[in-house]
Image (spheres, rainbow, N blue to C red):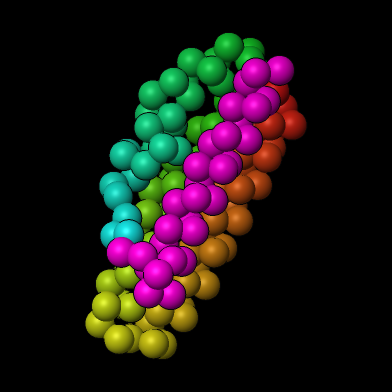
């Protein structure tokens, strides 16, 4: 049961990161983002997450876990672009990048919920 809670904690970590980006976009913060290895979700993906998913002994959970790396890295790239476009005053660029950021965020959210369901 603890593992299920852990997947939801990782989902919360992702949502908090996204809220920090949103606060900066709304000029309510000065979050500049991190490398995808250093956020809480990234630390888990590249750290304890590997063993936690192996411990489930579930091939589908392993596939879902493995499929998190690319969108997570992409999310960090795009969210950084959003912040850069905001700083540059590129309103059209912001809208395009923010749409992509939310699409990728939805993918990450769904994968974490899938892991929770498989735990």
> Vertical placement of 84 versus 37: above or below?
below
Tag count: 0
What range is drawn magenta here? 1-30
State left or right for residue 77 relative to residue 102.
Answer: left
> Vertical placement of 99 versus 107: above or below?
below
The residue most toward the right is 117
Q: Nearer the viewer, residue 8 or 72?
A: 8
Image spot of residue 92 (x, y percent): 41, 87
Image spot of residue 79 (x, y percent): 39, 62
Answer yes or no: is residue 106 visible. yes
Residue 27 included in the magenta stretch of the image: yes
Answer yes or no: is residue 63 visible. no
State left or right for residue 70 relative to residue 119.
Answer: left
The residue depicted at 68 percent of the width and 40 percent of the height is: 113
The residue depicted at 29 percent of the width and 47 percent of the height is: 35
Quick one: quadrant of the N terminus?
top right
What type of secondary structure mainly makes up the magenta span? helix
| Quadrant in the picture for residue 56 | top right
Image spot of residue 57 (x, y percent): 63, 13
Image spot of residue 53 (x, y percent): 56, 20
The residue most toward the left is 88
Q: Nearer the viewer, residue 73 or 10?
A: 10
């Amino acid at each position: 049961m603890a593992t299920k809670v852990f997947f939801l904690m990782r989902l919360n970590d992702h949502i908090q990161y996204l809220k920090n980006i949103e606060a900066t976009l709304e000029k309510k913060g000065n979050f500049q983002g991190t490398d995808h290895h250093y956020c809480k979700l990234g630390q888990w993906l590249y750290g304890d997450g590997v063993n936690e998913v192996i411990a489930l002994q579930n091939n589908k959970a392993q596939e879902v876990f493995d499929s998190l790396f690319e969108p997570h890295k992409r999310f960090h790239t795009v969210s950084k672009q959003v912040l850069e476009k905001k700083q540059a005053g590129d309103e059209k660029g912001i809208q395009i990048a923010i749409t992509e950021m939310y699409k990728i965020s939805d993918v990450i959210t769904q994968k974490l919920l899938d892991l929770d369901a498989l735990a």
